[in-house]
Amino acid sequence: MQLVTQQLAGDMQQRSPDQVLANASCYLNMLSKVVVAWLWLRQALAAEAGLTERAETDQGSLDFYRGKLQAAQYFFHWELPLMHHDAQLLLDRDSTCYDMPVAGF
C-alpha cells in the first residue's frame, strides 16, 4: 500500500491527473481491504482475549469467539490477497481504463 501510494503521489506531479485517477477504483478497493483487515485483526485479538478469559464459560460464547477467529482467517486468506491484483495494475500504470475512447461508451 505504501509503495503504491508513493508511486501515485509521484505520478500526480509528473503525469496527467486524469491518467493517474483513471484507476482510482483500484486504489480505493485496495485501501478498503487494508482498512477492513485492520478491523478484522482487532476483532480477532478481542476474540483471542475472550477465549483466554472465558476458557470455562458457556458454549455459546466460545462458539461466538471461534466464529470471529474463523471469519478473520477467511478474510486474511481469501479477500486480503486480492488487493495484490489491484496493486499490480497500479504499479504497472495500466492504461486500459484511460485509453477507452468516450465514443466507446
Image (tube, helix red, strand yellow):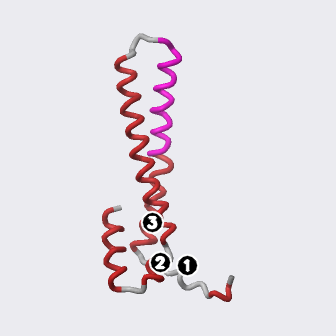
Q: Look at 40% across and 34% down and name the residue there.
A: 44
Quadrant where the N terminus sits is bottom left
Q: Nearer the viewer, mark 1 or mark 2?
A: 1
Main SS, magenta region, reads helix
Q: Look at 47% across and 76% down and name the residue there.
A: 21
Dot 2, how many residues are within 10 Å of its Cα: few (below 14), some (14-19), or many (20+)?
A: some
Residue 78, placed above or below residue 95: above
Point out residue 26 in the picture as x, y percentages from the top left corner: 49, 66
- The residue beneath circle 2 is 94
3 or 1: tag closer to the N-terminus: 3
Point out residue 43 in the picture as x, y percentages from the top left corner: 42, 35
Dot 1, how many residues are within 10 Å of its Cα: few (below 14), some (14-19), or many (20+)?
A: few
Point out residue 104 in the picture as x, y percentages from the top left corner: 67, 85
Can you tell which mark lies on residue 97? 1
- The residue beneath circle 3 is 27
* Gap between marks 3 and 2 measured at Cα: 12 Å
Residue 70 falls within the magenta-colored stretch: yes
Relative depth, front residue between 95 and 20: 20
3 or 2: tag closer to the N-terminus: 3
Q: Amino acid at mark 2?
A: Asp
The answer to whether marks 1 and 2 mark residues whose Cβ atoms lie closer than 8 Å is: yes
* Gap between marks 1 and 2 measured at Cα: 8 Å
Q: Amino acid at mark 1?
A: Cys
Start-end of magenta stretch = 58-76
Q: Look at 50% across and 37% down and name the residue there.
A: 71
Relative depth, front residue between 11 and 89: 11
Q: Look at 39% across and 16% down and name the residue there.
A: 54
Dot 3, how many residues are within 10 Å of its Cα: few (below 14), some (14-19), or many (20+)?
A: many
